[in-house]
Image (spheres, rainbow, N blue to C red):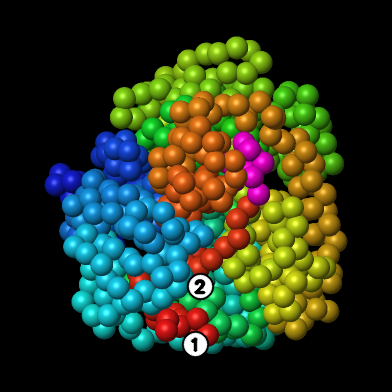
Amino acid sequence: MPDAVALTIDGRPASVPAGSSVAAAMLATGQAAFRTSVGGAPRGPLCAMGICFECRVTIDGIPHRLACQTLCEPGMEVRVEQGLGAGGWGLGNGAALRAGRGDEQGLGAGGWGPGKGAALRAGRGDEQGLAAGGWGPGKGAALRAGRLEEPGMAAAAETHRFDVLVIGAGPAGMAAAAAAAEAGAKAAVVDDNPSPGGQIWRGGSGLAPSALAARWFERFRAAPVALFSRTRVFDAPSPSVLAAERDGALVELHYGKLVLATGARELFLPFPGWTLPNVMGAGGLQALAKSGLPLAGKTVVVAGSGPLLLAVAAYLREHGARVPVIAEQAPLSRVAAFALRLAAHLEKLAQAARLRLSLAGTRYATSCWPVRAEGDGRIEAVVLGGAGGESRQPCDYLACGFGLVPNVELALLLGCALEEDRVRVDEWQQTTLEDVYCAGEPTGIGGVDLALAEGEIAGLAAAGARDRARPLFRARRAAARFAARLDAAFALRPELAALAAHETIVCRCEDVALERIVSCGNRRAAKLYTRCGMGPCQGRVCGPALEFLLGWPRDSMRPPLVPVAVEQLAGSEAPDRAPG
């Protein structure tokens, strides 16, 4: 493999280290803005894990490619997306995606697929014949990647069958797949990243941050597990079948037992200026650094809540960044009490001590949080507030995350019951559906130790080896107790709900401000009248924020779970849901 990759970014030649993501390459060459929002504002990456869709760019003429999920290739041409139409998905020359009665209204839950009897209009006129719910093409026309394609779009799906299918290749998914395969099951794992490891072990064994990770990578690769990388599940068209997209092709996955290990994403709370380029998640900036973003000499403020902030700050400093302050919203009393309890967990105490030592010279400010971000076209400074008053800190990046949100969308689509926004499971990690198991963060945020224990139990139980799973219960209980203490120590304070001003953008996909959302009274009305939650992220960013800010409960889920080409929706249709 060559040491460097040559490509062009908005017509400018660039050379980046091999293995760099397109997002890392763009930021490294000074391109902070990746797209223009619905309201005309510059936007850049936020989550760096394919959730927020803020990093979508045009690559080799194909629009809406996720820069954070795409690796640079020789000769690649990357362009910033501009002139987006209504709904944030430009259909060429700013044409709008219209549904129902000829405007932006009437889209179904999740924002994809027009309502009953609606037409999908794209630039040069209507393509009639879409069925209720927007399933299936009219007259063979397809809307793909922002342009109309030729007829005959529903290509044959690539079909695979497994005894145990695992969704998600983070620690829980790796443990589940390896355990199931070792127990004799024909097992596979599906993940949308280029390599296994999830966010915490992002980049594969070559970037494994610990001996624990190295051991699990070795075990995972030794097991006879089929790995589907860069593959995104978007539908469950019929019982025991999932529809997924990989490199533009439809993949049909049949399973006997299913293990959901879909992980979590960062919780983002809106505050003035949070939509500026180079304001991103704490884990998001770390992920970009792991995928090739050079940070040497850059000033980074790390803010939000939880021990992830320390780990991110240490990683960024190790890679040459200057981190003047870590702003932790939790009060000193709770943080100190949690630190004292680490004495009962010697390994974790040692980890914490090493982290703190590596952060010598970085101020750890408790009861402190970002009040606003300032800058012209990108962040230039962040104003921190809290118990000690306000202070302004110049910076190149603000890495900010207020904890984690379980990814339960696929579980909801399948019909699994939730309990306090977590997937309900029994002692075998079985959900309320007989053939579906769940492990890791979707059952509750608990960290890597709990995820590994739950994943191994779920994989063994799904493979019919419950006798081998029971000895793991003790480790799961211990990890769950630690997770509960962690959750209590870093619980979010109510003051954070007042950070967003009336004019602060909450829905980044559709540029919807808080005052417009509040005036609607509830989430459903906000969808209908403002399109809040109906953009490409489908409420994954603004939904949890609104739950914290306003107490609005989570929505139900409808397919597709992620944006896909209409031709793939047509190809995934079940007989009882086919257009007619």
Counting residues from the start of the chain, the first of labels 2 and 1 encountered is 2
Percent x, y of residue 404: 62, 46
In the depicted view, which residue is nearer to us: 37 or 302? 37
Q: Where, by quadrant of the figure, is residue 208 drawn? A: bottom right
Percent x, y of residue 20: 34, 52
Kind of residue at disc 2: Asp
Instruction: Let me know if residue 551 is in the magenta part.
Output: yes
Q: Where, by quadrant of the figure, is residue 330 drawn? A: top right
Does residue 259 show up? Answer: yes
Q: Name the quadrant of the C terminus.
A: bottom left
Category of crowding for the residue at label 2, using alpha-carbon neighbours closer than 10 angstroms: few (below 14), some (14–19), many (at least 20)? many
Residue at image x 54%, y 36%? 519
- The answer to whether the residues at label 2 and label 1 have Cβ atoms under 8 Å apart is no
User: Badge 2 is on which residue?
Assistant: 235
The label shown at residue 575 is 1
Nearest to the eye among marks 2 and 1: give it. Answer: 1
Percent x, y of residue 131: 41, 75
Kind of residue at disc 1: Pro
In the depicted view, which residue is nearer to us: 116 or 336? 116
Give the left or right position of residue 370, taking residue 386 as reference: left
